Image: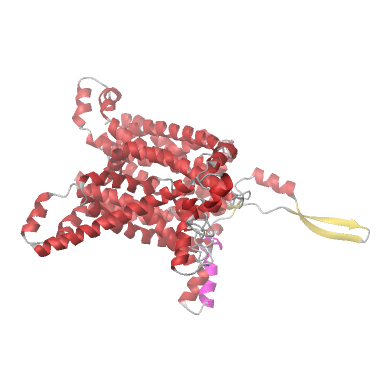
């Protein structure tokens, strides 16, 4: 008994140590960047001594205080990052709304139809889901140039909606499978059409699944780089390609700090998102897994 | 559900996928059979005081007109696929003859853009995926042993690397391992090598990208495994304890078999996601030492002289790779589906 206790004490130490290590590895980069975004470049990228970043030696020398908002001012005002933030908001909001509308209809149909073609549709969706987005982008560019639709926000929105569909369909399909069939079928026995049954019986109970799926649509649209970088013109750029374009001019003193400030700004909404929707994100991640 | 109703319900979604996924694939295929027009050359005679000279110049006007008239370029058949930038059979054959050892051949083959990108993409996919599985399981077991109040915050922190935009995540790490960043400088001190730069060596760059891949994907495996651990049945565990199974044996023979379907799911998702590795290479600015298939496509497309033919060919080969990767899964699902029906 004593031996067993000792072994388990060792095990607890090891496993707790591992978790602690992981927590540091997962969070330190973000904390460090957040801290560093209030410094000047000479401190955050310190040639002489990394402790400068903690003490803010150069920041104090250049600005008079240990923290500075120069990076943020440069990014948001000078480089007009607010414009990119606004574009991101428009794109993300539209993508989430449209793909959920399409996805709930399609996902519901896939969950309720027992024919063989539903299986093939789901399989095709899986293959589409696996395709790297950039391969599709190489197919868009020429036709979009021809039709003169390249560079506008609506183009990027509809493309992101389409790219999002396979995933949305899969996820909502598995959520609708969980809603008992009897519910809408009894409504149809009472004389509803299929659409009325969907509208009055299914819609009121589907929100948990739709919110979870919406979170992942949000993440896909927000995190996209391949599509928005290639399909949007300079003035319509969203945040992520904008940050990438800051990097092009890294040689100029101070510009790196613009990128650092922009990176922190773009991470903040995601942080808030996890804060409020942690449970939904976790359940969404596992939804596909548990049902296979 | 009637076919008609089904059709109208699925219509918006299917239309979007046909227009923006299926047709672009067709368009990519057609593009991959074409190459850009060469510049139109014109011979002009320059007559000066010392006699006349014939000179060949680029006729910009004619080139522009030709390119506008036929934006696809000229038909090239499969030559795009076999050229030096893609499968490069001729180059490979001649390299094989000229090299004296297999290592030498590999070194030479790594100068071909497609094979170089494929080598990195596959290495990344097949190194990151197992590490993610093992690390995810380890963290899940660790968190599961924690007191309940610590679990929520741990999950909160763990979600960050996964949820954050890939480009942003890689930039955050890149700034830290930069030779002037906090980790880069620390490594220089620890290894006593002031000239050490992770970016200068191809091997270190590959390791850096793989570490990023594990860092950003481990949370996914962790969360899925952690959710699975909550549903491990109590009875077999107790039975195993009564039979005298050690903690390790209980994990090995009860918990892991229970988690097996989840591991298959994670592997599938990870293979798909890692195969399209792209943003980290942009974020870490690692293109000198590591390129992936997706990065190659991106590189062909950007800039003023986009090479649509080359990009489309790489895209077709990438799609082929995705299908090869997915075939076992598709076959398995097909069998399951049939078993369920019968």
Foreground of the two, A10 or B52: A10
Measuring from the top left, give residue A20's x and y in whole percent: 30, 54
Query: Magenta stretch: residue B84 in it?
Result: yes
Q: To which quarter of the image does residue A151 belong?
A: top right
Identified at 48% across, 46% down, the residue is A136
Image quadrant containing the C terminus of chain B:
top left
Measuring from the top left, give residue A225's x and y in whole percent: 48, 45
Q: What residue occupies the far right of the structure in this picture? A: B49
Measuring from the top left, give residue A55's x and y in whole percent: 48, 51
Measuring from the top left, give residue B327's x and y in whole percent: 34, 55
Q: What residue occupies the far bottom of the structure in this picture? A: B100
- Vertical placement of A199 versus B159: above or below? above
Q: Is residue A286 left or right of residue B37?
A: left
Foreground of the two, B215 or B30: B215
Q: Is residue A191 left or right of residue B31?
A: left
Look at the image and tell me whether residue B311 can be seen: no
Identified at 75% across, 51% down, the residue is B59
- Vertical placement of B175 versus B69: above or below? below
Look at the image and tell me whether residue A157 can be seen: yes
Q: To which quarter of the image does residue B51 belong?
A: bottom right
Image quadrant containing the N terminus of chain B:
top left
Q: To which quarter of the image does residue B129 belong?
A: bottom left
Q: What residue occupies the far top of the structure in this picture? A: A191
Foreground of the two, A248 or A131: A248
* Residues shaded magenta: B82-98
Query: Magenta stretch: residue A19 in it?
Result: no
């Amino acid at each position: 008994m004593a031996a067993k206790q000792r072994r388990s004490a060792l095990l607890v130490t090891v496993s707790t140590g591992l978790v602690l290590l992981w927590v540091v590895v997962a969070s330190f980069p973000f904390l460090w960047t957040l801290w560093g975004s209030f410094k000047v470049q000479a401190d955050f990228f310190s040639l002489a001594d990394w402790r400068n970043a903690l003490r803010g030696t150069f920041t104090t020398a250049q600005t008079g205080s240990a923290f500075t908002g120069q990076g943020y001012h440069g990014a948001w005002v000078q480089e007009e990052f607010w414009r990119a933030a606004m574009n991101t908001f428009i794109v993300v909001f539209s993508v989430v709304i449209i793909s959920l509308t399409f996805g709930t209809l399609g996902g519901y149909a896939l969950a309720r139809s027992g024919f063989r073609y539903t299986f093939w549709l789901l399989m095709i969706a899986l293959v589409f889901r696996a395709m790297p987005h950039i391969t599709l982008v190489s197919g868009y560019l020429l036709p979009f140039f021809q039709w003169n639709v390249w560079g506008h926000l609506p183009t990027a929105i509809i493309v992101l909606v389409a790219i999002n569909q396979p995933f949305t369909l899969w996820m909502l399909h598995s959520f609708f499978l969980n809603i008992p069939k009897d519910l809408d079928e009894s409504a149809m026995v009472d004389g509803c059409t299929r659409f009325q049954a969907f509208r009055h019986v299914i819609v009121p109970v589907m929100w948990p699944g739709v919110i979870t799926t919406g979170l992942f649509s949000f993440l896909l649209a927000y995190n996209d780089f391949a599509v928005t970088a290639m399909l949007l013109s300079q003035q319509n750029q969203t945040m992520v390609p904008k940050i990438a374009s800051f990097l092009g001019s890294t040689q100029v003193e101070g510009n790196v700090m613009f990128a650092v400030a922009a990176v922190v700004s773009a991470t903040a909404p995601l942080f808030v998102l996890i804060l409020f929707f942690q449970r939904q994100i976790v359940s969404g991640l596992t939804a596909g897994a548990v049902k296979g | 559900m009637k076919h008609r109703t089904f059709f109208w319900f699925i219509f918006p979604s299917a239309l979007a996928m046909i227009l923006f996924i299926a047709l672009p694939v067709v368009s990519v295929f057609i593009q991959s059979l074409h190459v850009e027009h060469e510049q139109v050359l014109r011979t002009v005679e320059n007559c000066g005081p010392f006699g006349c000279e014939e000179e060949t110049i680029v006729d910009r006007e004619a080139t522009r007109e030709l390119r506008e008239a036929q934006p696809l370029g000229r038909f090239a058949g499969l030559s795009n696929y076999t050229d030096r930038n893609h499968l490069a059979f001729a180059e490979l054959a001649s390299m094989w003859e000229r090299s004296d050892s297999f290592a030498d051949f590999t070194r030479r083959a790594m100068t071909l853009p497609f094979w170089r990108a494929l080598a990195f993409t596959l290495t990344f996919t097949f190194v990151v995926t197992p590490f993610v599985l093992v690390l995810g399981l380890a963290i899940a077991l660790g968190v599961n042993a924690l007191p309940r109040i610590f679990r929520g915050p741990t999950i909160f922190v763990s979600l960050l690397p996964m949820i954050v935009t890939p480009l942003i995540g890689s930039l955050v790490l890149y700034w830290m391992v930069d030779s002037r960043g906090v980790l880069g400088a620390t490594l220089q001190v620890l290894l006593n090598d002031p000239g050490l730069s992770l970016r200068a060596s191809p091997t270190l760059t590959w390791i850096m990208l793989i570490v990023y891949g594990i860092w950003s994907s481990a949370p996914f495996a962790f969360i899925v495994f952690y959710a699975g651990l909550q549903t491990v049945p109590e009875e077999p565990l107790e039975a195993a304890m009564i039979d005298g199974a050690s903690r390790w044996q209980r994990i090995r023979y009860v918990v892991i078999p229970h988690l097996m379907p989840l591991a298959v799911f994670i592997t599938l998702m990870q293979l798909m996601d890692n195969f399209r590795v792209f943003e980290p290479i942009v974020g870490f600015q690692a293109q000198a030492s590591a390129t992936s298939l997706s990065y190659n496509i991106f590189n062909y497309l950007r800039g003023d002289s986009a090479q649509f033919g080359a990009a489309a060919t790489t895209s077709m080969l990438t799609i082929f790779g995705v299908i090869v990767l997915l075939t076992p899964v598709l076959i398995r699902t097909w069998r399951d589906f049939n078993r369920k029906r019968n």
